[in-house]
Amino acid sequence: MTDRSRRRFVTNIIPGCAAALTAGLFMRMGHAAIDNDDLAGREAMFYSKLDGNRVRCELCARRCEIGAGRRGFCRVRENVRGKLYSMVYGRPAGLQVDPVEMEPMYHMVPGHSNLCVYTASCNFRCRHCHNWRVSQRDPDEITTIARLPHEVVQEAVNRGCRSISHSINEPTVFFEYMYDIARHAREEGLMTLFHTNGYINPLPLRKLLEVMDGVTVDLKAFSEGFYSEVSLAELGPVLETLRIIREENVHLEIVNLVIPTLNDDTGEISDMCAWIMDNLGEDVPLHFNRFTPSYRLTNLAPTPVTTLEAAADIAYGKGLKYVYVGNVAAHKYNSTWCPGCQTRLIHRTHIAVLDNSLQNGNCGVCGYRLEGIW
């Protein structure tokens, strides 16, 4: 994800809670309270109760077993006397207005203002994270603000935003908050999206997609070795997430941050693009973004632009129709080109839209219909 935490529009949150039972899996809706003055939160929607007041979180692919008084790998979901609670509900680290292209989301009403919501922590431990100041912290280590879901939506309306995104840290970890915000946003006619590492279980993902218009997924690499060594995760659940998003017909865009020596092998990139073609189709926008040294990978150099261009050529060679180069201002592949006649339809420099000649999603020259929400 892009590094936005240092230039955020800060506004913060109040805690709330919830309750319902389905086949041993608790999918909680509504409001409840923890009867402890030192704690407040929303009861988790997806978890199972185990013996001895232990619980199993069913939200992400880790399926953490959590003892009483303990938190899961994500640092923000706590077992309170045998019930699992989110410790970040109503407690964002910030609300920030950007062009929707910042996500990046290039095929969803280009150029409009988007309100981005983020909290503490993540269910990955990426060594290269640009937003580690919030994503690698627990909620007790950062300053937060107080906003209930309907207040976030009202803030988006007041700021003239057409959409609300959930990004910067991993939104899976604040699932309940994101879900409630998205429901309220839909009621107000706002578009909704989230930018994720894709490490979420199928049942909560399908539930979330019911209230989402778009998803940007970080496909960090196409090797188990990278996921294991760099992110402390696995590739398989991410690929399953991508398939499900396409099955549910929610607009999808993919980001691959190309890191020198770690995931820039041309054979691996070729395999990734072939997998996207075979499993997701030719019209999924793919962003190859430039890495800059950050967090625990400051020893590596920024990605050469030629490496990104070679990746884009591979993607086009495999048949993908919409390929972008990100974090390189004024590059040809910042822009959207017609797959039919190669006319530049949306002129961008980095994330700024300079011109948009699309006509209701169609090329004005050859009439080609582009994939997206226009």
Image (cartoon, rainbow, N blue to C red):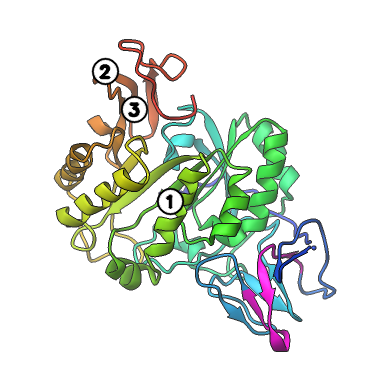
Residue at 66 percent across and 50 percent down: it is: 179
Question: In the rendered structure, which segment of residues is drawn in magenta?
Answer: 40-56
**Farthest-out residue, bottom:** 52
Residue 3 in sight here: no
Camera-side mark, 3 or 2: 2
Residue labelled with disc 3 = 348
Q: Amino acid at mark 1?
A: Leu
Q: Position of residue 168 (x, y in %)?
A: 49, 53
130 relative position to 289: left or right: right
- Marks 2 and 3: in contact by CB < 8 Å? no
**Farthest-out residue, right:** 35
Camera-side mark, 3 or 1: 1
Q: Position of residue 171 (x, y in %)?
A: 55, 55
The number of numbered discs placed on residues in the rendered structure image is 3
N-terminal label among 3 and 2: 2
Q: Amino acid at mark 3?
A: Arg
Q: Position of residue 100 (x, y in %)?
A: 48, 35
Residue at 30 percent across and 12 percent down: it is: 366
Is label 3 in a helix, a strand or a loop?
A: strand
Task: Using the image as rendered, state which of residue 250 and residue 260 is in the foreground.
Answer: 250
Q: Amino acid at mark 2?
A: Thr
Q: Position of residue 295 (x, y in %)?
A: 36, 65
Q: Quadrant of residue 50?
A: bottom right
Residue labelled with disc 1 = 242
Residue labelled with disc 2 = 343
Is label 1 in a helix, a strand or a loop?
A: helix
